[in-house]
Image: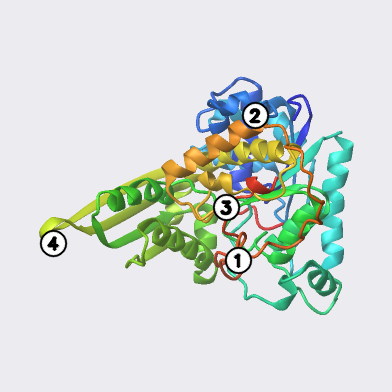
Amino acid sequence: MGSNEPTGLWLVGARGSVATTAVTGLLALRAGLIEPIGCVTERAPFTEMGLVPWEHLVVGGHDIAGTPLEKRAEQLADSGLIPHRVLTATAAGLRAVDAAIRDGYHPSTHTGAQALAADRLAADIADFRERNGLARVVVVNVSSTEPPVPHVPSFDSLASLRAALASADRAVLPPSSLAAYAALSAGCAFVDFTPSPGVRLPALHELAVSAGLPYAGADGKTGETLLRTVLAPMFTARALRVRSWAGTNLLGGGDGANLASPTQARGKLESKARGLEALLGSAVTAPLHIDNVPDLGEQKTAWDHVSFEGFLGAKMSLQLTWTGLDSALAAPLVLDLARLTAAAHAAGVSGPIGELAFFFKDPIGSDEHRFAEQTTMLTEWAATLAHPQPTELSTADPTTPEMSAPTGRLESRGAPGEGGGVGESSSARAREDTPGGRA
């Protein structure tokens, strides 16, 4: 990947808190106004990869919200998230990015077949790529969390999905999955930073592989779950028995309002629970509550109580509290994922990038949840992209690559929105957000 190649970052939910924070931060990084704190790709070995520099990332997006990006940034500045000096210096850049944001897909206002909506979304992205002379575009979903959806036969193959999309009588795909379909149809890599159904459908995997496109997700790991992926392996390594792990999340802003609905919160709760069970190696009593506290604004507080058993049955406990500004934790990861996924696309990777599990609560393409092991996977993968090995010549007859996930290598883990994904990394083969709304 040539580091001088201009690369697009297309944000689904482009006027939400995470997207606004990411765009403001990107503009501030370009101007030298801030340090890249929280940007993993600004550390070795990622600095040796020749990743696209900040000044060559061009931003656009989809959103159903009409609040201009500059106004949204003002609201975040008033909440204490964005420094006012940064807001002043980046105002013109925010207006320029806002001009590149297009109307997203809303199921209640769209009429006609979903295929028409997908074609419009894909055309917006393709036009963005062509107008800006971009080598490639990475589409990142940072829109509001959607509830899980029941599995239907149309999800099982690309042909059946396309037939269903052509029908004007039904809306087969949730907005997040329609955004993924449009991105892949436009020839773009896709990253799902939410726990929404998104790209986790067999038909979308088929589309990605057939088009030679990478994808990654799901559900960005920024706070409470990040701590769990560090602490849970400690208990198992020391042979301590975790009896229960209870958690409470208090949050405000658009994310709090969205997740106040039990239906909307279901995917988030399931994503967290799957990760904890995988970390501990067995099911454990793990009640988790998400409460909307409007007064907190952009701040999120997570409290965990861990009850565990030691030698001779001794009962002990650990309590921890994490308080942070979630968009400030998520935004640099969005920028990191755009750079890394662009590098994977340029290197010819297709299908799920399991090595990016480091960034996600419910990683697609990997069953590894332990943070230390995820870190090793990521850095070793980065080294292979930075220093690719020569391809070995083979005398075997060429075979036609399979368009669907090979049995035993990419097993589906469940229904869309319920861990549906794959079970192994892709390298061998080649928001919780805010009033931003959905694509």
Q: Furthest residue to the top?
A: 32
Q: Sequence-wise, which precedes: disc 1 or disc 3?
A: 1
Residue 386: assigned label: 2
Q: Where does label 1 land, which residue?
A: 412
The answer to whether mark 1 and mark 4 are in CB contact below 8 A is no
Q: Residues within 10 Å of mark 2 (few under 14, many from 20)?
A: some
Q: Residues within 10 Å of mark 4 (few under 14, many from 20)?
A: few
Q: Sequence-wise, which precedes: disc 2 or disc 4?
A: 4
Q: Where does label 3 land, which residue?
A: 433
How far apart marks 3 and 4 lie (CA) works out to 42 Å
Quadrant placement of the N terminus: top right
Q: 39 above or below 17?
A: above
How far apart marks 2 and 4 lie (CA) works out to 50 Å
Q: Sequence-wise, which precedes: disc 1 or disc 4?
A: 4
Residue 90 vs residue 6, the one in the foreground: 6
Residue 313: assigned label: 4
Mark 4: amino acid = Gly
**SS at circle 4:** helix
Q: Sequence-wise, which precedes: disc 2 or disc 3?
A: 2
Q: Quadrant of residue 276?
A: bottom left
Please tell me which residue is depicted at 57% across the width and 52% down the height of the picture.
Answer: 433
**SS at circle 2:** helix
Residue 143 vs residue 226, the one in the foreground: 226
Mark 1: amino acid = Ser
